[in-house]
Image (cartoon, rainbow, N blue to C red):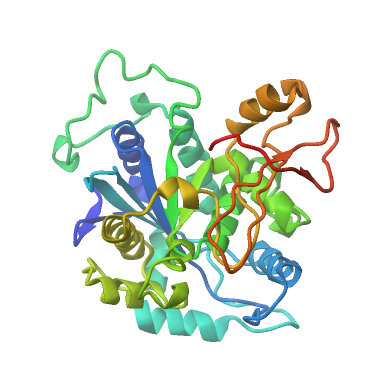
Amino acid sequence: MANLINGIREVWDQNLDQEILLMEFAMRRYTMISFDTEYPGFLRYTPRDASELKIYDNLKFNVGRLNPIQFGFTLFDRTGNVGGTWQINFSDFDTEINTNDCDASTSLSLTKRKSGIDFVKQRREGVLSRSFAHKFGEALNGSFDARKITFQESSIPIPCPFHSQNSNQTSPKRHANLEWVTFHGLYDFGYLTKVIAGYKHLPASIATEMLLPDSLQGFQLMIGGLFGRIYDIKYMARFCGGLQGGELGLQKLANILKVGRTGSAHQAGSDSLLTVRVYLDMKQLYNLDEKVYEGFLYGVGGRVMRRDISRQFSLRFGWPLSLVPPPLYGLVKISNTQRPVVVHCVPRPVFQTPTFPLFIQSSVGL
């Protein structure tokens, strides 16, 4: 049975299977998912005025050499109903970093003091990231096998037909239309991409830095293919009056909006739930059209585009779909001082990975 703390479901190695199944069932009803990552810190710190090349180079270095401490996921819908919050506690996070660039132990100690995470318990009872990646990937694809799990009925908070005759039926890519919400999500997507993609492609002994693409554009294309629709509320806050142009943290943003927190700050489950509340409150208070902000991550230019847009480009510009490899090789450029401008691109008609997309102005809607 999960440890329920302030309504947040704590996930450990012993209850991983049943909690992943609960998440998969909730995804059938709630099509938006907020997530947050707690990680040890930074081996390389990035100055505020750093170039995008430097930002991504540091991200790749940090994410490739560190493992996350926690993932937090909250499933919800556009009307504000929350289907549940899960906090995944990993056992294979980093406690000692040997590097010439920096020592993340200070950040880890700070995380421990601020959040109250019990690292000893987490190391002993936590989830291996590769086990989580395998099972969470199956949940996203609708292929997680419920027949392998024995449930205590009292542990199930919502009606679920786990033991029905059809519980073993699967639907490939069942949850491909999930919409992902983050706060300052560049590193969140970095760690989630590393964990989900890494367990299939690389042995545990190989550094996962090589898993991430060489360029920021390639990284944006990768997460567009993996996650589809994404929103970053720190980016959205840039265009909302009274929110300091987005230059503030999640808790300060929540304080301005008078949004309450459940659980402890700097724990992934609590932060993912607070992200949902801030997102919904901002949309209502500022009457935001979320489609305008879809695909933009705070701190970098370019727009992450979901895979299904590739068909629109194919029909609009005549490229055969076979020449539009997934994920779509296209970005949208914007000005740092203006609202997003819809400027689409056409992928180059080549089978190998293109270097730079060809940008053109078009009227294709998102």
Q: Residue 135: x, y in percent?
A: 47, 39
Q: Residue 335: x, y in percent?
A: 63, 63
Q: Residue 141: x, y in percent?
A: 48, 30
Q: How many numbered discs?
A: 0
Q: Residue 231: x, y in percent?
A: 47, 52
Q: Residue at x 37, y 43 (%)?
A: 32
Answer above or below: position of 83 versus 184: above
> Which is nearer the eye, 250 or 110?
250
Query: In this image, 175 relative to 15: left or right?
Result: right
Residue 127 visible in the current orientation: no
Query: In this image, 276 relative to 359: left or right?
Result: left
Query: In this image, 11 relative to 212: left or right?
Result: left
Q: Residue at x 53, y 86 (%)?
A: 106
| Res. 280 image quadrant | bottom left
Q: Residue at x 24, y 34 (%)?
A: 151
Residue 88 visible in the current orientation: yes
Q: Residue at x 45, y 84 (%)?
A: 110
Answer above or below: position of 219 versus 326: below
Q: Residue furthest left?
A: 154
> Which is nearer the eye, 95 or 261?
261
